[in-house]
Amino acid sequence: MTSGIELRGVTKDFVVRPGRGGPGTSVLRALEDVSLCVPPGEFLTLVGPSGSGKTTLLDLLGGLSRPTAGSVLVDGREVTGPGLDRGIVFQQYALFPWRTTLANVTFGLEQLGLTRRERTERAREHLALVGLDGFEDRYPHELSGGMKQRVAIARSLAYRPGILLMDEPFAALDAQTRDQLQDELLRIWRATGTTVVFITHRIEEAVYLGQRVAVLSSRPGRLKALVDIDLGDRRSTNDLRSDPAFVRYRHDVWTLLHDEVRRAQEAGHLKVQPDGTERAA
Ligand code: ADP
Ligand code: MG
């Protein structure tokens, strides 16, 4: 089971309360008129400067918030709230510390009307899918960051959602673990056929994972570009990241994004930190 997504003219405003003693409330436009179709089974990555509305967009897809204007559709039906047809994986692992790995994955499966035995089987199957067989009885504090994120992915997939929404899920991991999980995720995506929307601020990650890369403009986030990534069968290339085609795509997306980061800085939306990273102002 896989699902398609459609965004039609989506705008999202937030009402911002003033600081102490400030004037009345103001409206912050986070997204403006975003229209986008993600066909069933696609792996779409989404990049944009910090504060460009990436998380806002994912929340709308997840049904955690509603658009101010426009609509969000899954398989042609308007999204009005969260649903088991859409799994979400966040940057923070969001596991229950008092539950074992297995119990973290079985949690919530009652809602699917499965028996206890079916729930356990389903959880074991998905832990195996993310390479965690043998770790069923461990607690989160006994797992590395990468393993915790594997559990979170297994938990989302155990519902067999048609759509997997991921908000910078590998951002907190070291480079080696991140590379490994990227390959694992591609393998899982091929095995399940799930539609994936994956947010990252890392250009290389976006190009490595995505069949298409969507680039958001600086605030308010508009769809600036959609870049088709055609790298053939990625599995046949050992060092894809050094492949000339890969390097060219990375440069293209970098150029699109760099323009936006500069614009955001000029507008005062972004402050560059001493370590060179950006923060929303
Ligand atoms: P990104 O994930 O691309 O860094 P976000 O979607 O988190 O960006 O935020 C987009 C903009 O909307 C930012 O300026 C952020 O401060 C603002 N924003 C996000 N959520 C809220 C909220 N609940 N209330 C007010 N402003 C918000
Ligand atoms: Mg975000």
Image (cartoon, rainbow, N blue to C red):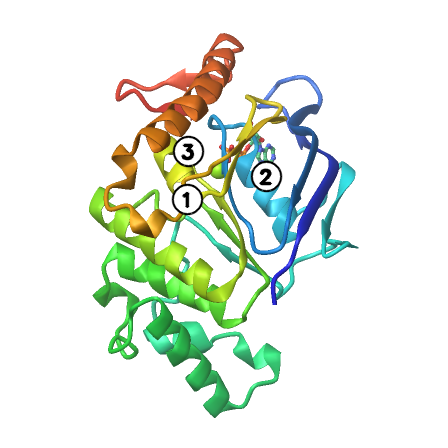
Q: Mark 2 — residue?
A: 56
Q: Residue at x 57, y 45 (%)?
A: 58
Identify the mark nearer the N-term, 3 or 2: 2
Identify the mark nearer the N-term, 3 or 1: 3
Residue 96: x and y in percent read 39, 67
Give the spatial CA distance, label 3 vs label 2: 14 Å
Q: Mark 3 — residue?
A: 201
Q: Residue at x 25, y 33 (%)?
A: 242
User: Residue 272 lies in what quarter of the image?
Assistant: top left
Secondary structure state at the residue bearing disc 3: loop
Identify the mark nearer the N-term, 1 or 2: 2
Of tags 3 and 1, the one toward the viewer is 1
Disc 2 within 8 angstroms of ligand 1 (CB): yes
Disc 3 within 8 angstroms of ligand 1 (CB): yes
Tag 3–tag 2 contact (CB < 8 Å):
no
Q: Is residue 275 above or below residue 265?
A: below
Q: Quadrant of the N terminus?
A: bottom right
Tag 1–tag 2 contact (CB < 8 Å):
no
Secondary structure state at the residue bearing disc 1: loop
Of tags 3 and 2, the one toward the viewer is 3
Q: Amino acid at mark 3?
A: His
Q: Mark 1 — residue?
A: 232
Q: Residue at x 35, y 34 (%)?
A: 204
